[in-house]
Image (spheres, rainbow, N blue to C red):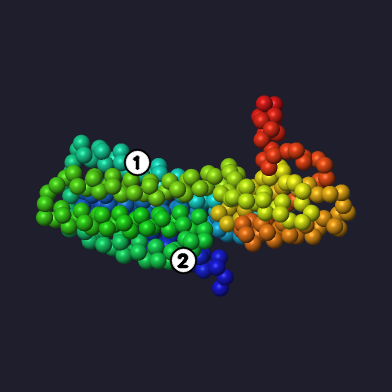
Amino acid sequence: MDKQQLNGRRFFLVTVLNVIITVVEIIGGLVSGSLALLSDAFHNFGDSLSIILGYVAQVIAGRPENSRRTFGYRRAEILAAFLNALFLIIMSVFLIIEAVKRFQHPEPINGQIMLIVAVIGLIANLVSAALLHAGSHDSLNIKATYLHVLSDSLSSVAVIIGAIILMFVDVTWLDPLLTIAVAIYIAYEAWPIIRKTIEILMQSAPQLDYPAIEKDILAIDGVEGVHHLHAWSMDEHRIVFSAHINCRDMKISECEPIYRKIEQLLTNKYNISHVTLQAECQRGRQEDLFDTDADEKHFCN
């Protein structure tokens, strides 16, 4: 079984678990009167949708390159990760607003029912997190989904603690306070994914040591200059790189070994997966590594 099939089965199992948790927590939240449980149920419902979206994106990302998508479909997972993380942020704001309303209009809560439902939710969320943990290191998409269920686990722990306290002490402000705490944590965990996916989608330059890259390329025998450098990320693993290099006047066949040396350097030392080079003789010798003047002219036009 390949990695995509394995992740597909895990996505399916996690989706089923989240649907079950959602139903149980909605019923438990309505019966107990707990906003924390209802917010957790809403969170789990969102998880189910995001897990389905994440799996569909993973399947699309595995499609081969073609004439319409010459770089393939890898950014489908980046889009899914962005949408999942954005949903978490929106949901966090919604939960905080509802919690503030509950502060103003407190309602009685059945701590015992709240505790039982929260324990069931915690167990199911821990199983879901365990299923997705392995793949969360290799994919922003799976990581976003993993954070969904992990935040659910932590919110279940908070609800359990709150339920135990409410069984012995009648503090109506505790339930909305827990809701706000969980919402802030969810937003805190989702924001780095939002920032990273936006950087990739906007084709921001990856964090590379560009002065060192220029120095290493110029150290290769036959290279006399380098300019018009561009670098961007197709996804969180694949960096695309292009540059113009100045060489002495030579045949194309003589230039190819220089290409191979530069490609090996960039691949082995800087983990760049796709390299495009353009050899030139005199053109561009006086230009900088980054063609900022051309960008300014394009902007002015």
CA distance separating discs 2 and 1: 31 Å
Identify which residue, 144 or 58, lies in the foreground.
Answer: 144
Left or right of residue 108, residue 63 in this image? right
Which of the 4 image quadrants contains residue 126?
bottom left
Identify which residue, 175 or 189, lies in the foreground.
Answer: 189
Quadrant containing the C terminus in the rendered view? top right
Q: Relative to 243, is 56 above or below?
A: below
Residue beneath the point at 52% across and 61% down: 138
Left or right of residue 79, residue 283 in this image? right
The image position of residue 217, as x and y in percent, is: 70, 53
Tally the marks.
2
Residue behind mark 2:
134
Q: Secondary structure at mark 1?
A: helix
**Residue furthest to the top:** 300
**Amino acid on which the number 1 mark rests in the picture:** Phe
Which of the 4 image quadrants contains residue 93?
top left
Q: Residues within 10 Å of mark 2 (few under 14, many from 20)?
A: some
Residue beneath the point at 32% across and 43% down: 95
Q: Is residue 75 visible?
A: no
- Disc marking residue 94: 1
